[in-house]
Image (cartoon, coloured by chain):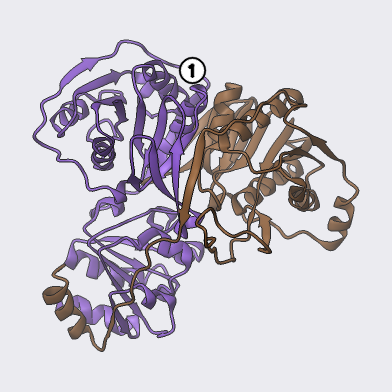
Amino acid sequence: MKLLVCVKRVIDYNVKVRVKADNSDVDLANVKMALNPFCEIAVEEAIRLKEAGVASEVIVVSVGPKAVQEQLRTAMALGADRAIQIDTDTMPEPLDVAKLLARVVEQEQPGLVILGKQSIDSDNNQTGQMLAALTGRPQGTFAYALKVEGDKAVVTREVDGGLRTLSLQLPAIVTTDLRLNEPRYAKLPDIMKAKKKPLEVKTPADLGVELKRHIIQLKVEAPAARKAGIRVDSVDALIDKLKHEAKVI
Amino acid sequence: MSILVIAEHNNQALNPTTLSALSAAQRIGGEIDLLVAGSGCRAVADEAAKAAGVGKVLLADAQAYEHALAENLAALVVELAGRYSHILAPAGTTAKDFMPRVAALLDVGQVSEIIAVESADTFKRPIYAGNAIATVRSDDPIKVITVRASAFDPAAAEGGNAAIETLSQVCDAGSSAFVGEELVRSERPDLSAARVVISGGRGLGSGENFALLEKVADKLGAAVGASRAAVDAGFVSNDMQVGQTGKIVAPELYIAVGISGAIQHLAGMKDSKVIVAINKDEEAPIFQVADYGLVADLFEALPELEAKL
């Protein structure tokens, strides 16, 4: 069974985000970029399935400008066999990404597609579900555990209030949550080897997809800052303030 | 404008986040229908019919909807979508699962987790874990929107008297099946609905020490939460996590104990009305957002707090 993993290049999660002075967007100039953390978990899960003999090949795909090749190489250093970059000038919105990925799914026919549940930049949490809709495949989102059993994927999902387990008819789409696994680090020899692994570049036109804007970003602002309050010197003073000043207890 | 709000429920009772989504729909303005899709969920529809501002309740009661499988729910909503300009649902794990599927099947974008309605097509939503707020406009004929419940005061649960229309169509894709679930049972209020939340971080040191928090929580009728650091350290389970990757809460009182205040945690609680921080490290960033900060050893402060409340 082939596995397809879809990954996104995003701002490194340790970087403090700043809004541009003209409020047009977040400032990404000269900022450290990385593989989206949820995508890293998706890559790790795919590699584990290959190591367990469930998968025969792991293909990693990313949408975006040439710079995303860096993240594709990272995924190959971690163990993906080959990569596809879908070349776009800007980062398309989730529906368009899902349409592009749906064409790759059609061409590659993976038994399972694994994606991160959301990217830490736009926080949309949409692409996996949209891909599932467009390919007509069942979905297991926010995976906490994943097992392939015959022609089924058994996915335990993180839901409000606990865990829920579903059985999906393969081929299927799975999106990862934080506790699915702990991603490994790439070893230096593997980073060297990854440079020689095949990386194919396709355009939306090659895939027959026309990009379109559905959601227009008008403005980006810093959130309202919360003012620091006061220090209290004892538990008694705290209880007094909560009772008589804030009146919340 | 005509709006479809999709109810979140457990086949027995309406989840209060539905009332917040309803309140967001009222800000958009227009006729509002409420869809209750589930199995044996008549009581939920009866409850929904009483909510203020609901024009009509659509009841889809069938086995196929019992476990809110995304494939089946999305197919049902898509069948109904043609009548509406907006489709809204509270951004819990159910709607986060099926709503993007609805949007893709309708060939429209989705606006995720709105925190404000600017006009019928323009909304505010947090990006970068709440470190920036984007104002976005949807140019699609049908606007598919999930609503961050903590950002909208719930609509009144009583006062309405909507008619209930029973839907006969059953959408069953048959490609996924429910196997089982493990829900955490708690005597305490639900995190996302509690008036008071007390959360612990890595400073608690162990899962056993969360008992100190629970005793204070019982005195205050509070829900107990945790930072991601505490979850990652294995102290408590992930459903207690408050933060960008967990629950987003906005209670009247939030007490952060032994929590340093990482950005990802602040994103989940900074809209609380009053924030208290108890931490022995006076440099901890949590103090920068706290209304009341107490620099103290939590192992002394918590028992004292419990005794004096």
Relative horizontal placement of residue B257, taking residue A149 as reference (left or right): left
Residue for point 19% across, 28% down:
B54
Q: Which residue is mark 1?
A: B173
Q: Residue B202 location, x and y as percent?
A: 45, 72
Q: Is residue B238 above or below residue B73?
A: below
Q: How many marks?
A: 1
Q: Nearer the viewer, residue B113 or B205?
A: B113
Q: Residue A123 location, x and y as percent?
A: 51, 48
Q: Decide: few, some or many residues near mark 1? Use Cα within 10 Å; few <14, some 14-19, many ≥20.
A: some
Q: Residue B242 location, x and y as percent?
A: 39, 59
Q: Nearer the viewer, residue B216 or A194?
A: A194
Instruction: Determine whether the residue tagged by mark 1 lies in a helix, strand or loop.
Output: loop
> In which quarter of the view is residue B230 placed?
bottom left
Q: Which residue occupies the extreme front position in the image?
A: A22
Q: Nearer the viewer, residue A172 or A37?
A: A37
Screen quadrant of the C terminus of chain A: bottom left
> In which quarter of the view is residue A191 placed?
bottom right
Colour of the chain lettered A: brown
Q: Amino acid at mark 1?
A: Ala
Residue for point 55% across, 57% down:
A26
Colour of the chain lettered B: purple
> In which quarter of the view is residue B59 placed?
top left
Q: Is residue B73 above or below residue A174?
A: above
Screen quadrant of the N terminus of chain A: top right
Q: Is residue B286 above or below residue A149?
A: below
